[in-house]
Structures are given as C-alpha cells and as structure tokens.
Image (cartoon, helix red, strand yellow):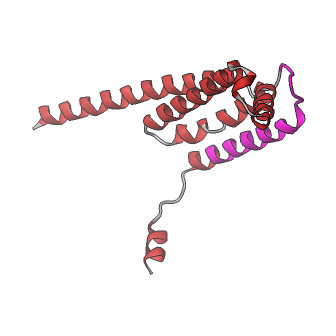
Amino acid sequence: MEAKARDSKKKPKSRAAKIAGIVSTVLWVVGFALNFVIPAKTRFTWVPDFLLLVGFWPLLWVWRPGWPWIIFGALNMAIGFVLEVAFAMGDANFTPEMKLVREHMHDMHSSLTWIVIGLISLIFGIIRTVKQIWCWIAEKRKKKDVL
C-alpha cells in the first residue's frame, strides 16, 4: 500500500532530465562500443574512457547540487593517479596475473584522461558550490533586511 502511495506522489521527470538521460546513455553506449573497436596502443585509446566519463556530465548538470561534481572529480582524479602509479611501478611488485592486468590497463586506458576529466569536474563543482553558497547567503541577508 505504501509503495503505491509513494509512486503516485512522484513528480514526472522534467524534459531536461529525460534529455540528460538519453545523452548520457548514448555517450556510454558509444564509449563502451569503442572499447572493442579501437585497437590497443593507438593514439585514440583515450576516447572510450573520455566518452564514458563525460557521459556522467549531463546527469550531474541536471542535478543541481555542486558537491556531486566535486566527489565525481576527486574520485576520477584518484583513479587516474592510481593508474599512473601502477604504470610507474616496477614489474617486481606484481604477480604474473597482475602484470597482465597492468599491461591491459596501460594499453587501453589513459590515466591522463581520468585526471583531466576529474580536474574539470572538480573545478566546475567548486565553482557551482561557491555560487550556490553565495546565493544562499544573499537570500538569507535579503530576508533578514526585510524583517
């Protein structure tokens, strides 16, 4: 009974949310498909990761808070740095199975893509959060002046 009551109270998705969902899905499908099309060790190996990561941006854009951008950016940068550290470590630190995984990661995933997309997202999230806090403070001051 409660589930039906909750479902009937849900607001319909906005047009922007529907468009964001479609754009994100298209970017993810294309990015995933390109993983199987683009060969390893080419100059275009960054494209699938780029499309998969940028596929989150439309959804984050529709969602108003800035903090999800900050978390998304920080985590992507962390993944990029972990990839970079793994690429820089010597072979003695890995088992044979781990070496295969590391080779695949090095051949098919660009750590710089993760770091750059993370940095852009982080900066945008900080700007958006500062703007939201600024507007919130201005609104509170305006209400205080009216009273």
Relative depth, front residue between 88 and 52: 88
Residue with the most extreme front position: 92
Query: Does residue 24 show up magenta in the picture?
Result: yes
The x, y position of residue 120, in whole percent, is 56, 23
| Quarter of the image that includes the C terminus | top left
Residue 59 placement: quadrant = top right
What residue is rendered at 43% in x and 28% in y? Answer: 128
- Image side of residue 117 versus residue 135, left or right: right
Relative depth, front residue between 101 and 6: 101
Relative depth, front residue between 67 and 145: 67
| Quarter of the image that includes the N terminus | bottom left
Task: Tell me: residue 5, above or below residue 31.
Answer: below
Q: How would you classify the magenta stretch by its main secondary structure?
A: helix
The x, y position of residue 129, in whole percent, is 39, 30
The x, y position of residue 70, in whole percent, is 47, 31
What residue is rendered at 75% in x and 30% in y? Answer: 102
- Image side of residue 142 versus residue 31, left or right: left
Residue with the most extreme left position: 147
Q: What stretch is highlighted in magenta?
A: 20-43
What residue is rendered at 44% in x and 75% in y? Answer: 5
